[in-house]
Image: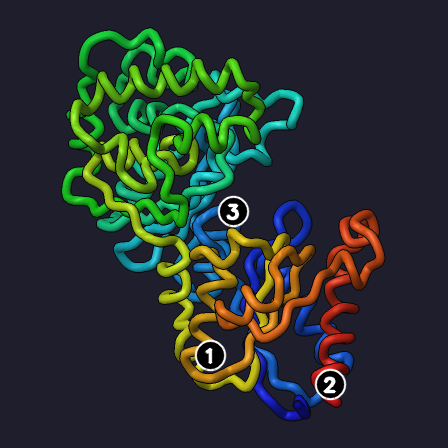
Amino acid sequence: MHTCGVRIVIAPDKFAGTLTAIEAARAVADGWRSADPEVQTELVPLSDGGPGFVEVLHAALGGSLVTRRVTGPLGAPVTAEYLLDGETAYLESAQACGLHLVPAAERDPGRTTSRGVGELIAAAVADGARTVVIGLGGSVTNDGGAGMLAALGGTPHAGLAGGGAPLAALSGPVDLEPARRAVAGVRLVAATDVDNPLLGEHGASAVFGPQKGAGPEQVRRLDAALAAFADATDPGSLRDAPGAGAAGGLGYGLLLLGGTVESGVARVLAAVDLDSQAAAADLVITGEGSFDSQSLRGKLPHGVARAAAEHGVPCLVLAGRVAVDRREAAAAGVTESYALVDSAGSVEAALARPSEELRALAADVARRWGR
């Protein structure tokens, strides 16, 4: 394929822990242009609802970024922002209660709170938002959205704002009406591609608790605490709904307020109009930190490859590491995949100079495709 003068759409996710989606897109574009100066590149950075959600949507939609000081996961104030686009606000839970806000040694999902997410929602509603889309992912909390509900309810119910552990002591029903009144007439959307329920072996505590600092015994206690919270807030089946376990149960908290769960990938792909972008391209490039079996089950690279395939456009994946065989990748619409670890020579080299190594990989791939 001779790439000179062709149009390439570069649509990566973040490379978790090293590059934002925007930084990754720029690195790929710079690298490709170094090998093919006449190529036309369209940068379309993406997010699935986790960190980078607001930044990506701001780049795609415009709108106004609003900055607020809110309660962080350990109680100290943090700075967070949301995007206001007409009467729709977009925010990401990670800005108020993300893993990156707590050093690894201090992570304790028994005491981290989602209170700041509720404060962000309240601020967006006060600014006139009638739809609030909350990107879920990358949280350091496991409180079922209890802190968020406490913030929206004005006077916190005893035990709701103190993290996951105190929920075990709840007895009797929790009055959610103050929180529901705070968002009356507002459409709440939980944007996530996690379909875990709140409880059990596939729930928030068991699946995501360990990355937030929970050992096996604490996972068991946190799951029991969330069960007590669910008994006190909803006797029905919301706890079993797909997505209820997203972001430490923030999905459940939003469902309690009448919210809906939608695909974060689909929401972002629609916002950037990737379908039209792919239709006008000669080549589509996507990427993420780890291209593995989960990538082919609804994550961003799968959505991008599918959009490219629908228009008969080849799709390349440039990733930190590749753990998918070519046949699996081809079945999902991926033409070729390339690993940063392989081109850099080691994991250490790839992590030490991620932007430079991604540029070098893109340049090398461009030369191969230009033959």
* Crowd band around label 1 with a 10 angstrom C-alpha radius: few (<14), some (14–19), many (20+): many
What amino acid does circle 3 point to? Pro
Residue 278: mark in rendering: 1
| Image x and y of residue 260, in percent | 24, 45
* Residue at x 22%, y 28% (from the top left corner): 179
Q: Is residue 109 left or right of residue 336?
A: left
* 200 or 367: nearer the viewer: 200
What amino acid does circle 2 point to? Asp
Q: Is residue 239 left or right of residue 166?
A: left
Q: Secondary structure at mark 3?
A: loop
Looking at the image, residue 322 lies above or below residue 270: above
Looking at the image, residue 335 lies above or below residue 114: below
* Snapshot colouring: rainbow
Looking at the image, residue 363 lies above or below residue 211: below
Q: Quadrant of residue 183?
A: top left
User: Quick one: quadrant of the C terminus?
Assistant: bottom right
* Circles 1 and 2 in contact, beta carbons < 8 Å: no
Precedes in sequence: disc 3 or disc 2: 2
| Image x and y of residue 189, in percent | 28, 47
Residue 51: mark in rendering: 3
User: Mark 2 = which residue?
Assistant: 36
* 318 or 280: nearer the viewer: 318
Q: Is residue 56 left or right of residue 29?
A: left
Q: Is residue 205 left or right of residue 184?
A: right
* Crowd band around label 2 with a 10 angstrom C-alpha radius: few (<14), some (14–19), many (20+): some
